Image (tube, helix red, strand yellow):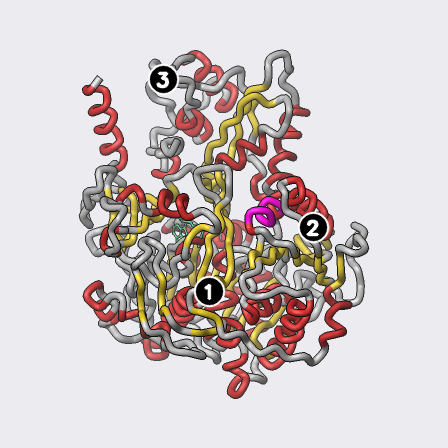
Amino acid sequence: MAKTVASKELTEVSEAQIAVHWKEEEHYQPSEKFKAQANMRDTHILEKFGLAKFPDCFKEYADMLTWFEPYHTVLDTSDAPFWKWFVGGKINASYNCVDRHLAKYGNKAAFIFVPEPEAERDVTIKYQELYTSVNELAALLRGLGLKAGDRVTFHMPMVPELPITMLACARLGIIHSQVFGGFSGQACGSRIQDSGSRVLITMDSYWRNGTLVDHKTNADIAVRTAKDLGQDVDKVLVWQRYPGKYSAKTPMIPGRDFFMNDLLKEYKGQKVEPVPLPSEGQLFLMYSSGTTGKPKGAQHSIAGYLAYVTGTSRWILDIHPEDVYWCMADIGWITGHSYIVYGPLANAATSVLYEGVPTFPDAGRPWRIAERLGVNIFHTAPTAIRMLRKLGPQEPRKYKYRFKSMTTVGEPIEPEAWRWYYDEVGKREAVITDTWWLTETGGFLGTTVPAIHAMKPGSCGPGAPGIHPIIYDETGAEIPKGSGKAGNICIRNPWPGLMQTLWGDRDRYVKTYFAKYNKNPRSKDWRDWPFMCGDGAVQAADGYYRILGRIDDVINVAGHRLGTKEIESACLTVPEVAEAAVVPVQDEVKGRVPEVYIAVKPGVPPSQDVIDRVIKANEEVIGKIARPKHVYIVPDMPKTRSGKIMRRVLAAISNRRDVGDVTTLANPDVVEQIRAMVQGKDTITTREALPEDIAKFGQAE
Ligand code: WTA
């Protein structure tokens, strides 16, 4: 018995330390021109944010904000690991993003909204106009009886009304919870329930790939879902994509649904003083997927979060008020919250907000927008880079835009794709920051400081200033740099951008992010609480980190985290399905996509109809991004003798790999049947090693 346990541990250790082969890439240097104008040029910046200077180094970020009352304590660790930053201060995020810029930048554009239809005109929103809209909307929300600490859920597309609504909430201390507009009504409903929102704010319609989508229909589903789960929604506030005109077919429900533009008439010209809120108040919730089927609400603070995204927007994105910045992410994700709304606005940026799909109507669209609006900072995800490269590798050459800096975020980027981004999109002139971080972390964890560090394709770089990563193996031993071994990347120290907790679930917060490497649960010393990010990583001899992907059964589809348990429970809503297992498959454009294996109940014949309904169930329960690439009906799932589904075997089959030794399974024969079904009779599997995240898939159970 003892022998079995020991050998199991040994296997785990050796798998965690698996050697990771990837050719060392050459370094690229930032240009002298970029360096000369950069916000952060101090070559000692990482030492200034060294652990010896922690936590006081972060005062520099707090000093970038305007405070109503100063804080007295930089970091309070008394309720470890629920860190409190800048305690005692009073502050307002809306004031910092809008009001304080009026004197100098009132006439400058805060946002330039670009509608998806190319014939439709841009809408420029100056800081002064943003101020007016945010105030009127805050007056309206206050008029509805909403106040600090209340939660309001949004299900909004990429339109200026979204940041306006966020800032109006922030002005009053209302905690906003924006659900990505592409998520289904059901997904929105379960997040309404978890957050306890009584108000839903949405929009009637929006443009996506050439179609004006009826989005109001999702609000009805969301309210119904929330009600079934026990949460009543009293009011649905509906923005109109074309003010004064209703662009959805779904009827409004009298007494519950109201057009925002009608209600706003009563509040014209009204002003609302920004409420001085405690540093430790909550700014917003952002739901994300984890190991269990229940999405978790990352709860972000007002002061710590805002300080962190303001500082990193200034130093890493290198935003100056005179720049024209464009982040193509959706505001419905953390990247949009931190690096379209709060960080850039706190720096008085001019930001482009694009409604639609980057490749609509063709792969030249982003470059036309960049040229026309004079964009000089560009920010996107590897999935968009791969797509634009595939559809229009030479397109950027046709346009005369010039970027000084570019960012990539959300997934590991292959050195090949990185080089296209650098050579073609950046025209060998723009620096690239590869920023690695998570919904939970508020802002960047791993990145170069662009004027100071060389770039290395495929690696994010060192820790951001004040972020001190460490890679542990399964036993808690540190994996040294340059060893070529991978492990679990953690952050040694707290930082202001880190979420405060998971909404309503302190235990899950501690368990998910700290339990594994904490040795003393009673310790109040932050050194005892490394934060586990949930990614595998290797550190090269030069100190740069390469992120290998999630280690917790989360599939990163086109930069969006989807929990396998969420997908599997969606499949199980189809009554004929007895068992479901989902695995990640490598995809040329999206990085990873889910593939689904199902076993049907006894007596049910396998049919295309069941497959179609499984696909539909995923779209309805989660959203179109969860659409499986394939659904296979299998005679039985490969299982261990204790009955556990071997997802790793299925992942090997889906990724055209050799399944390895399966003789210890309860039903080894079924593996060959499934393999033949998926790969065909004589498909040759590749011997190439599986990427780390897929190789480790299924171990978190
Ligand atoms: C992955 C997005 C490699 C990683 C901001 C992480 C990355 C997850 C990078 C978080 C990057 C994000 N290189 N992988 N530059 N950025 N990831 O919460 O696996 O949507 O854990 O936050 O995306 O995704 P999330």
* Residue topped by disc 2: 219
Q: Looking at the image, is 111 positioned above or below residue 220?
A: below
In percent of width and height, residue 90 lies at 44, 74
Amino acid on which disc 2 is placed: Ala
Q: Which of 656 and 600 is in front in this view?
A: 600
Instruction: Determine contact: label 1, label 3, CB under 8 Å.
Output: no
Q: Is residue 240 visible?
A: yes
Instruction: Determine contact: label 2, label 3, CB under 8 Å.
Output: no
Drawn side of residue 259 relative to residue 174, left or right = right
Nearer the observer, disc 2 or disc 3?
A: 2
Q: Gap in Å between the C-alphas at discs 2 and 3?
A: 47 Å
Which quarter of the image is occupied by the N terminus?
A: top left
Start and end of the magenta stretch?
Answer: 189-194
* Residue topped by disc 1: 281
State the SS at label 2: helix
In percent of width and height, residue 538 lies at 27, 47
- Could you tell which of marks 1 and 2 lies nearer the N-terminus? 2
Dot 3 beta carbon under 8 Å from ligand 1: no
> Could you say which disc has been placed on residue 383 in the image?
none
In percent of width and height, residue 574 lies at 63, 27
Amino acid on which disc 1 is placed: Gly
State the SS at label 3: loop
Q: Nearer the viewer, residue 415 or 357?
A: 357
* Residue topped by disc 3: 662
Instruction: Determine contact: label 1, label 2, CB under 8 Å.
Output: no
Q: Which of 270 and 238 is in front in this view?
A: 270
- Identity of the residue furthest to the bottom in this view: 103
For the point 54% across and 80% down, the residue is 99
